[in-house]
Amino acid sequence: MSFTTQENAPDSSRKTIAEKCGNDAAAIEAMRKRWSRYIGTAFDRNHVATDAEMCLLYPSGNARTKKPLKETKAETLDIPKAETKADILPDIKAETDTTPQTETTQKTERTNGQKAVLIACMAVPAIASLQNMWAVTSDISGHVSMSVLLTLLFSAFPFALTLAGATTKAGRILVGLMIVYEGFCNFIRIYGGLTGFGKDGYPTRFLGIVTEVLNTGTYGTATVLAAIMALLCGAVFYISYNELLKK
């Protein structure tokens, strides 16, 4: 069988090697390497290769085009890509993104000592308000035992919710109402103490001095002073309770 009838045999027209390569320097160089490998004789770009030589350069079964330039590009693509610095270096961005989150978490967490201080800040106004709450509750209920139980309930409930870790909206609202009641009891008792209700009916010496200095009325001044004291006491309790819920 003649080589020229093979399906993958190159063109047998009488052209030099340079012409078959399209006079492309890279393609001629690739042809020179293939010539040295498969034929072994001296390479001459002006040589007119025979069909037999072309079949040696491109054996049957390996389809090739007339221009070895395409073959050279295909062989170049098979070369593995060298690793760049971007492939070797670690992902610095991923590491830096996690650092601020960790620092933020550490800042929001409270130590046991800080929690103990906040609980103590809640306990001081609660203990100071016990007598006032008991007295007002006793006047409202008319029973000593009932007033004692209600006073213990109103005083201990916020601490129980805090220690149990309850942070529901309903629990916050209920604690807020108890703080309002505690402030009301403090206001009534402080006002009564300043104006002398339940005693001789005369205002205290302190209230008299304040009214003289500010040139204000006795009962109006007593109302303002009682409201300020009750608000300060309730604010200390509420702020400490709110900070504890933040963990």
Image: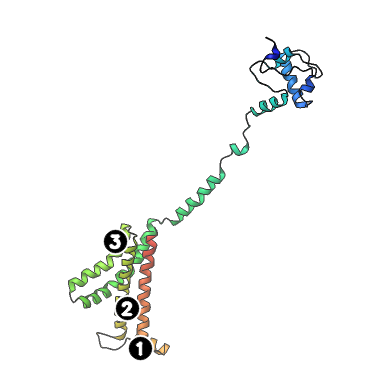
From this view, report whether residue 195 is shown above or below residue 143. below
Inspect this view and state whether residue 206 appears. Answer: no
Q: Residue at x 31, y 72 (%)?
A: 128
Question: What whole-number distance in Å separates the C-alpha atoms at marks 1 and 3?
Answer: 41 Å
| Disc 1: which residue | 218
Which quarter of the picture shows residue 150?
bottom left
| Disc 3: which residue | 160
Q: Are marks 1 and 2 in contact (CB under 8 Å)?
A: no
Question: What whole-number distance in Å separates the C-alpha atoms at marks 1 and 2?
Answer: 16 Å
Which quarter of the picture shows residue 71?
top right
Residue 179 x %, y %: 32, 70
> Which callout, 1 or 2, points at the residue further toward the start of the chain?
2
* Amino acid on which disc 3 is placed: Ala
Label 1 or label 3, whichever lies nearer to me, is: 3
Q: Are marks 2 and 3 in contact (CB under 8 Å)?
A: no
Which quarter of the picture shows residue 121?
bottom left
| Disc 2: which residue | 187
Label 2, secondary structure: give it: helix
Between 131 and 30, the residue placed more toward the observer is 30
Question: What whole-number distance in Å separates the C-alpha atoms at marks 2 and 3?
Answer: 25 Å
Mark 2 closeness class: few <14, some 14–19, many ≥20 residues within 10 Å: many
Inspect this view and state whether residue 100 appears. Answer: yes
* Amino acid on which disc 1 is placed: Thr
**Picture quarter with the C terminus:** bottom left
From this view, report whether residue 213 is shown above or below residue 104. below
* Amino acid on which disc 2 is placed: Phe
Residue 201 x %, y %: 27, 88
